[in-house]
Image: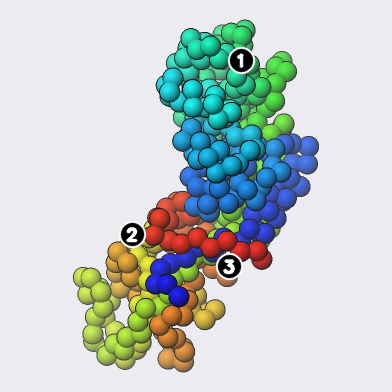
Amino acid sequence: MQNRPVARIHLDAIQANLELARQFAPRSRSMAVVKADAYGHGAVEVSRLLGDVDALAVARVEEGMSLRAAGITSPIVVLEGFIDNEELEALRIDRLTPVLHSRYQVDLLKASNHVDIPVWVKVDTGMHRLGFSVEEFRAGMTQGESLNVIGVMSHLANADDPGHRENLDQIDVFMEMTHDLDVALSIANSGAIINYPSSHLDWIRPGIMLYGCAPGAQPDDRLKAAMTLTAPVVSVNRITVGESIGYGSTWVAAKDTRVAVIGIGYADGYPRELPEGTPVLVGGQRRGVVGRISMDLTFVELDAGDQVEPGDTVILWGRGLPIEEIASLHGTIGYTLMSGLTGRVGREFCRG
Ligand SMILES: Cc1ncc(COP(=O)(O)O)c(C=O)c1O
């Protein structure tokens, strides 16, 4: 037993979640989004697991190169494309497919000897993050420029909010921009896959749903949590009424009690700002965090009957404790918690 937090990664859950995405969009191909180390789940292992997926997507060239170095042979799309000639060359050597979103990338590509490499083009339908504007696109920025465009994609700004009217507006703009093109089309991330069948088109791009987390604030029973974050109990302390614990002495015992000190802290990615009472599972029962979360350690108040010893394992989120619930206590989303785990957290891959 090592004293370190561990994220258990449930590989079967990831497969089941991809299957669910495919059931939502049976006529679409799937680009599984494994950027940011597969949202903290381990990009190499997840990519290996999803060996039969139509394509993988990463954000950056370096992420694609790491997957190739690990022996991943699936098609890999690089969502931010390349930033200079060096990256363009690296893409070409590793057979990564860039997404072009800006004029400078078209110019770099045309100035190279590689105008034949397959590319996706990104268009901006309202998010104003990356992508050619409607006007640039209509002016034939990439069409007729003898590039090998295999697809056009866009991204929704509000797919996590099914009621948001901007979603349908963006889909309409996308359809209008692309209706006369003979290339693959893609606009659906997880929220759109689940909520907007009209967005499915030729390719879906599931990210967060693969990892069993809902795109919105509420957990979705159809998804299976793919990460269970655990930490060991490293000490069990008796605290007398009136005594305080931790930095800032913020929590004072209202009665004689026991507190478990568990081996996880903000340097592992368990946010310091989580409020008192944030639930954890001790022996399957919900107990609350007390005092300040420190760099390596966190306090949990025990109930009188709890049988807890050093070496026991506590669950911070995952099976039995939805990450969406912890995220909303922190005023954030599951994406940030998963992808924010640091290298100190072990990863253990399991089936079931
Ligand atoms: C361009 C693009 N497509 C797809 C995704 C996947 O989104 P989600 O994780 O919400 O499914 C992302 C994630 O941010 C993205 O940036």
The spot of residue 59 in percent (x, y) is 50, 36
Q: Nearer the viewer, residue 159 or 145?
A: 145
Sequence order check: which comes first, mark 2 or mark 3?
2
Residue 345 numbered mark, or none: none
Residue at 38 percent of width and 67 percent of height: 264
Tell me: 26 left or right of 312.
right
For label 3, the residue is: 319
Please name the amino acid that badge 1 sits on: Asp
Residue at 22 percent of width and 75 percent of height: 249
Sequence order check: which comes first, mark 1 or mark 3?
1
The secondary element bearing badge 3 is classed as loop
Looking at the image, is 290 positioned above or below residue 105?
Answer: below
Numbered disc total: 3
Quadrant of ligand 1: it is: top right
For label 2, the residue is: 267
Quadrant of the frame with the N terminus: bottom left
Please name the amino acid that badge 3 sits on: Arg
Residue at 30 percent of width and 64 percent of height: 295
The spot of residue 333 in percent (x, y) is 48, 52
For label 1, the residue is: 116
Please name the amino acid that badge 2 sits on: Ala
| Residue at mark 2 to residue at mark 3: CA–CA distance | 23 Å
The spot of residue 175 in percent (x, y) is 67, 24
Tell me: 209 left or right of 40.
right
Quadrant of the frame with the C terminus: bottom right
Q: Are marks 1 and 2 in contact (CB under 8 Å)?
A: no
Mark nearest the camera among 1 and 3 is: 1
Sequence order check: which comes first, mark 1 or mark 2?
1
